[in-house]
Image (tube, rainbow, N blue to C red):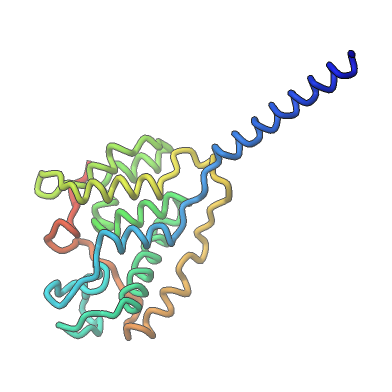
Amino acid sequence: MKKIQLLIILFIVGIAVGFAISASEAIKQKAPTFEDAIAIIKKYEGLSGPSHWPFVGYGHKVMPGEKFTRGKRLTEKEADALARADYAKLCAKYREFGADSLLLAALAYNCGPGVVAKSSVLSKLKAGNRDIEASYIAHSRYRGKQLSQLKRRRQEELAVLFVKDPTSLQETFDTEGEGTEIIEEVSEITNLSAPEHTEQKKDSVKHVAQSAI
């Protein structure tokens, strides 16, 4: 009888341990990826047409010396490659922030690196303060008014690209070499030198979110 009771106790303990391990694994968060960010960028930027000049592709502002033809819409392949190259350069700019480089680059893609440099989002992350949600969402204002589309974009970027607790990641995030091949390949597709992304986006709901806290 005692043997049976002991076996039952061991069985129950085994189940409890199994549940504990499963729960621990469930808490682990998958690291955000470059592809996650590209999907969000393309979703909210939309593919620019001839009427959006000097913007082409997914929110790329044509800079002096870049060989784009006014009135010609980029193909999806060209626009995708250009967006990846622009975003990869921004990721490299914020590489010191590890996994947070994806979030900062996404914000810079929409608002411009100059806005990010002055933002409390950047200063908080530099200081190790990860309570950035309110500061990040604040970048959904244009001329003092909060725009619903920009707010949704900021919320989605936070939900997908921001890791509140980096120790919860399932894998180590490494930005080393992120996007290098993409930047090299884009010149072949669009006949460009390494593209520069705009400091200031076009005057539209889709592209402007320059208020900073």
Quadrant showing the C terminus: top left
* Residue drawn where x is 15% and y is 83% of the image: 71
Q: Nearer the viewer, residue 213 or 68?
A: 68
Please identify the quarter of the rendering in which residue 95 is found: bottom left
Q: Nearer the viewer, residue 54 or 66?
A: 54
Where does residue 68 sit, x and y in percent of width and height? 23, 83
User: Does 29 sit above or below residue 89?
Assistant: above
Q: Is residue 159 left or right of residue 201?
A: right
Please identify the quarter of the rendering in which residue 41 is found: bottom left
Q: Residue furthest front?
A: 1
Q: Nearer the viewer, residue 193 or 10?
A: 10
* Residue drawn where x is 34% and y is 81% of the image: 193
Q: Residue furthest top?
A: 2
Where does residue 15 sit, x and y in percent of width and height? 71, 29
Counting every numbered tag in the picture gives: 0
Where does residue 110 sit, x and y in percent of width and height? 25, 58
* Residue drawn where x is 14% and y is 74% of the image: 53
Where does residue 119 sit, x and y in percent of width and height? 27, 45
Quadrant showing the N terminus: top right
User: Does 53 sit above or below residue 107?
Assistant: below
Q: Nearer the viewer, residue 94 or 47?
A: 47
Please identify the quarter of the rendering in which residue 208 is found: bottom left
